[in-house]
Amino acid sequence: MVTQTRRAPRVVREHTNMAAASAAILTRLKEEARAERRAKLSRVLAAIEPWYDWGTVETFSLKLLSDKSAGRFGDESMGEVRFFTFQWLGLHLHFEIGRTPKTVRS
C-alpha cells in the first residue's frame, strides 16, 4: 500500500511562514533592546566608578627663605610626602601627609 502525502493548503503554509518570520523578528528586536539596556547600564556604572591614586610627591615648605632670596623656594625647603587622591561623582579629594623642614636656613 502506497502512502500518499498531502500538502497543506497554500493559505495555511503562508500563515505559518508569516508567524515564524514575525516570531524571529520579535526575538531579534528583544535581543537588541536587551543589548541596548546592557550598554546603558555599563555606561552608567563606568560613570559612577570611583577613581583613585596614591604615591609620593615632593612638596615645598610653606615658609619662605630669608628676605635676601626674594621669596624663592630652594632645595632645602622641599620634603617628600605621601598623597592620596579620590574622585567620585564630581567630588575630588586630595590629601598630602608628610613632613617638610620647619624653617629654611640658607
Image (tube, rainbow, N blue to C red):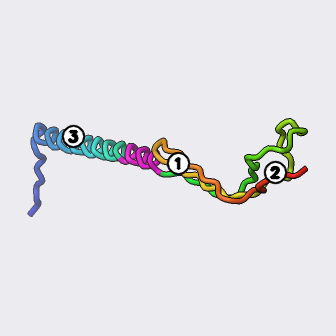
Please report contact status of discs 1 and 3: CB closer than 8 Å, yes or no: no
Label 1 neighbourhood size at 10 Å, few (<14), some (14-19), many (20+)? some
- Going from the N terminus, do you reach mark 3 or mark 2 first? 3
Q: In this view, does 90 lie to the left or right of 28?
A: right
User: Which range of residues does the magenta coloring cover?
Assistant: 38-49
Identified by mark 2, the residue type is Ser
Q: Quadrant of residue 100?
A: bottom right
Q: Which of 5 and 93 is in front in this view?
A: 93
| Residue placed under numbered mark 3 in the picture | 22
| Disc ID at residue 87 | 1
Above or below residue 17? Residue 102 is below
- Going from the N terminus, do you reach mark 1 or mark 3 first? 3
What's the CA distance linking mark 3 and mark 2? Answer: 77 Å
Q: Nearer the viewer, residue 51 or 37?
A: 51
In x, y percent, where is residue 11? 11, 37
What's the CA distance linking mark 1 and mark 3? Answer: 49 Å
Q: Is the magenta stretch mostly helix, strand or loop?
A: helix
Q: Which of marks 1 and 3 is in front?
A: 1
The residue located at (54%, 51%) in the rendering is 86
